[in-house]
Image: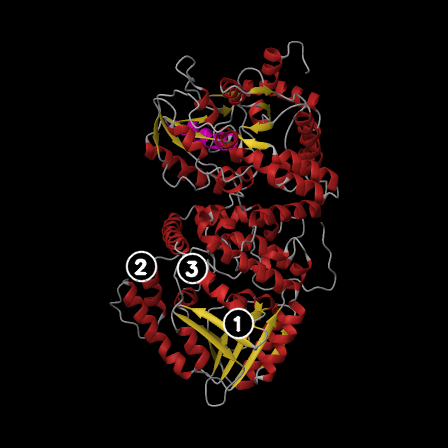
Amino acid sequence: MRVALFITCLADVLYPEVGKATVRLLERLGCTVTFPAEQTCCGQMHTNTGYQRDAGSLVRHHVDVFSRALDTGADAIVAPSGSCVGSVRHQHAEIARNLGDPVLAARADAVAARTFELSELLVNELGVTDVGAYFPHRVTYHPTCHSLRLLRVGDAPLTLLRAVGGIDLVELPDADQCCGFGGTFAVKNADTSTAMLTDKMSSVAATRAEVLTAGDASCLMHIGGGLRHQKRPARAMHLAEILASTREHPAELVTA
Amino acid sequence: MTRAYLGMPRGTGDLQGDVPFPKAAKTALADTQLRRNLGHATATIRAKRLRVVGEVPDWEELREAGSQIKQQVMARLPELLCELESNVIARGGQVHWARDADEANRIVADLVAATGAHEVIKVKSMATQEIALNEYLASKGISAIETDLAELIVQLGHDRPSHILVPAIHKNRTEIRDIFLAEMDSVDADLTDAPADLAEAARRHLRAKFLSARVAISGANFAIADTGTLGVVESEGNGRMCLTLPKTLITVMGIEKVLPSWQDLEVFLQLLPRSSTGERMNPYTSTWTGVTPGDGPEEFHLVLLDNGRTAALADEGGRAALHCIRCSACLNVCPVYERTGGHSYGSVYPGPIGAILSPQLTGMTGGHDPNDSLPYASTLCGACFDACPVKIDIPSMLVRLRTEHVELAGPRTVEAGTMRAMRWVMSSPRRFRLAGRLSRLGRLGVRRGRPIVPMPPPLSGWTASRDVPVPQGKTFRDWWLSEHEKGGQQ
């Protein structure tokens, strides 16, 4: 399968290791990975903060770049983020319609139909559940809200994690509770966000996991930033980094 | 998207607080007793709801039916309301139309005054909370006595409700006992905080009121247009006492509560109790149609309340907020509500539904008004949408209202400027790549996860509780280009 990587602006700039891990993992599974270098940002932050007009030009750019990728041979588009895929799938066409551009909306729908979050692509499109990973650590998984409720990825990430060699996977209490990130919510409502973060960190601590993983670098930036701020032992790592880890090339336990 | 519906009344009354949500939330978050009470209560109701919803095999079909019936009602609202009016009148009732809170309050106060009563008993009602009826009646020398146990607790405690269904959710048993001891006449000084003892104390307190009251005031969970029937669902039976004992009954109902026929009620009587109290069926369902000589009230008045609903109805993308059946499932699953409580929202409608309904009823200004802050009081986690029995897509509506707020605020705010600048950078691959490289300089300003120079608001909100991310090595795209496509662009 030829897969075009939609890296997301956050992983591109702040968490390049997440992107490298995604590439290594997909290439190991026999995919041909391309990176449309013209891509920038899906516009989710603008959209969700109320700046639909600004988001509109980013949506147009995203649709242009990834339509071209699909036209030039990519079978699918993958992003290591439930949230950004959620925006592509549930917001892009509507923004185009709201801004009076039905042609762009139709193209956005076509791009969205071929855009997948990483665990969706692996389990549902590639039909893989054991990616041959090895990660001998105690891990707990936080299902991010947009993966859980917008994309309905269901058990796909846990199915992948259960098959990882050496892993000690422990259930996160109250896993389906939001971590409190919410994009600009974290700064506009910083106190409430912190109260939610505190409860999430307590749940993580209760598992005695070394690693908290999730499918979104944004939520991990928030929870991981909180864990480090409080000097807690658990680190945040993206799902892609665990799945890319092998006996030969083990992932370092660095914070995502 | 900007709406300007001249001539349509906007919601007035108790629909907006005094301070923006983040500020009110900060105060609430500092109250650890409140956090414990709410955490315990919402977790209990959440578990009950999941259990009883899980046992209904066609729950999703019921939700869809509820949603479609409400869509149909909104599409036919004027016609259904006229049908309801004529059927209520045909059965001996009287119908009054109120544009806003002031008008509704005046109508009710005049009706009570005409009976000569100085005291009325009340069935729990969100519509009368919304228009702040009790306060208005008090200003006219009429005391309104809440008969729902939790509303009574709130009233005796000189407090405000903080939840649609469980108005005293922010109080625990001991706090309730203390309120009863301080405020109830002839209460047993040895009253314990056992639920049965508290209920018994309330029962004794209220019984005398039920038997002496000449006027009752209620809201309505629904009205059936083709028969002119009104209905209330409740748990305690106090409502039925109010609806049957007094000589005069006055019902204040939001215009969106009308349903075409009895058959539609079947859907909502399944959806509502399971979503609200987590029960298969509510203990009391009372319905009444006009007046019946020798049985129940001799006089019945229906006050149909607009108070911003027509304006919400006129907004195609926003009218689904009017589908709400006030079950409060969205409050119980909301991680923001669970931590901040209902008072932080200012309006009588708190939680996710309040965050969309209150600003739609009152309108927003684009400034720093409290209701302009409500659409931002959510992480867009989506738990409310999943729980809503009539499938209101609250997260999408929150985003719509944020967009409306931003358009009202105009392009001159600092935030708008920042967003424009970010859009400018992000709409060009070259500028974006350069910005990614420049971000590497950021690590110079960070030591052990903390910025060396304190961050100004709003960024200080991030750094207060989280380390800042420090970019390591090259950006992904620079790494990719150096690895895969020597020499730059593809």
Residue B163 appears at what percent x and percent y?
A: 46, 58
**Relative side of B206 to A118, left or right:** left
Residue A18 appears at what percent x and percent y?
A: 51, 23
Q: Is residue B63 above or below residue B307?
A: above
Q: Residues within 10 Å of mark 1 (few under 14, many from 20)?
A: some
- Whole-number angstrom distance, CA of label 2 to CA of label 1: 43 Å
Q: Secondary structure at mark 3?
A: helix
Q: Give the magenta range.
A: A217-232
Camera-side residue of B13 and B72: B72
Residue at screen point 38% across, 41% down: A174
Report the residue marked by disc 1. B262
Chain letter, disc 2 residue? B
Q: Residues within 10 Å of mark 3 (few under 14, many from 20)?
A: many
The answer to which quarter of the image holds residue A204 is top left
Are discs 3 and 1 less than 8 Å apart at CB? Answer: no
Chain letter, disc 1 residue? B
- Whole-number angstrom distance, CA of label 3 to CA of label 2: 28 Å
Mark 3 / mark 1, whichever is N-terminal: 1
Report the residue marked by disc 2. B174
Q: Amino acid at mark 2?
A: Thr
Report the residue marked by disc 3. B274
Camera-side residue of A195 and B390: B390
> Any magenta on residue B256?
no
Mark 2 / mark 1, whichever is N-terminal: 2
Residue at screen point 56% across, 55% down: B18
Residue at screen point 32% across, 63% down: B177
Chain letter, disc 3 residue? B
> Would you say residue A211 is visible in this rendering?
yes
